[in-house]
Image (cartoon, rainbow, N blue to C red):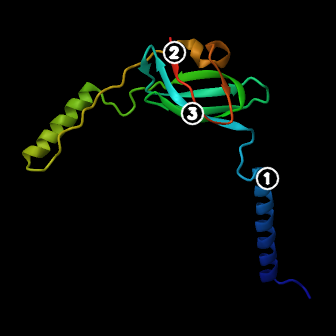
Amino acid sequence: MPLTFGTDSKWRRSWLVGTCILALAAFSGCSGGREPFPTGEVSGKVTYKGQPISLGKITFISTGGGGYFGTGIINDGSYTLKAPLGPCKIEVQVESDENKYAVSPQQEKMIKAKMKAMRDQGMNVPDPPQLTKRPKIDLPEKYKFADQSGLQFEVKAGTQSKEWDLR
């Protein structure tokens, strides 16, 4: 019995779905949701000359080969990340827009003027929030590279804390 268009179409669709499922399984691996290498959780604070780094990232790079690393976001000095177990070299980078969400004095003036105009029209407008800039930190170049930073840490299984006061 010859195949009809409808049957051929269903067969092709089934074959395509099956192929996609196999491809996804092959690309995702069989890790079962585990990390591709053993890690420990590290959290803490990063400061430069006592000032918390407002926005940046910290990376722990394994010195044991394999190219394993873990990166975490630094926000108001605090970070948390999963890092490879064993000895690691550390690099710290400060984001270039450390004044994210801050506004210039000109913008602040415009916002206050707009809010005053709305109040004058009888609208119920809350007081403007305090719009302050975060302190700008010029971190020395050496901290941007793990091989030059001089920062090291032995990551163990489980949770640990490490404070960094950079100079």
On the image, the x and y values in percent for residue 22 come to: 81, 60
Give the residue at mark 3: 72
Q: Whole-Å distance between the Cαs marked 1 and 3?
A: 26 Å
Identified by mark 2, the residue type is Leu
Q: Callout 2: 10 Å neighbours few (<14), some, many (20+)?
A: some
Q: CA distance from mark 2 to mark 1?
A: 41 Å
**Within-10-Å neighbours for mark 1: few <14, some 14–19, many 20+:** few
Query: Residue type at mark 3?
Result: Gly
Q: Position of residue 122 (x, y in %)?
A: 8, 50
Instruction: Name the residue that disc number 2 marks.
Output: 166
Q: Is residue 153 left or right of residue 25?
A: left
Q: Which residue is mark 1?
A: 30
Q: Is residue 37 left or right of residue 121?
A: right
| Secondary structure state at the residue bearing disc 2 | strand
Relative to 159, 77 lies left or right: left
Of mark 3 and mark 2, the one earlier in the sequence is: 3
Residue closer to the observer: 91 or 112: 91
Name the amino acid type tagged 1. Cys
Q: Which numbered disc, 2 or 1, marks the residue that appears first in the sequence?
A: 1
Answer with the quarter of the image where residue 8 lies. bottom right
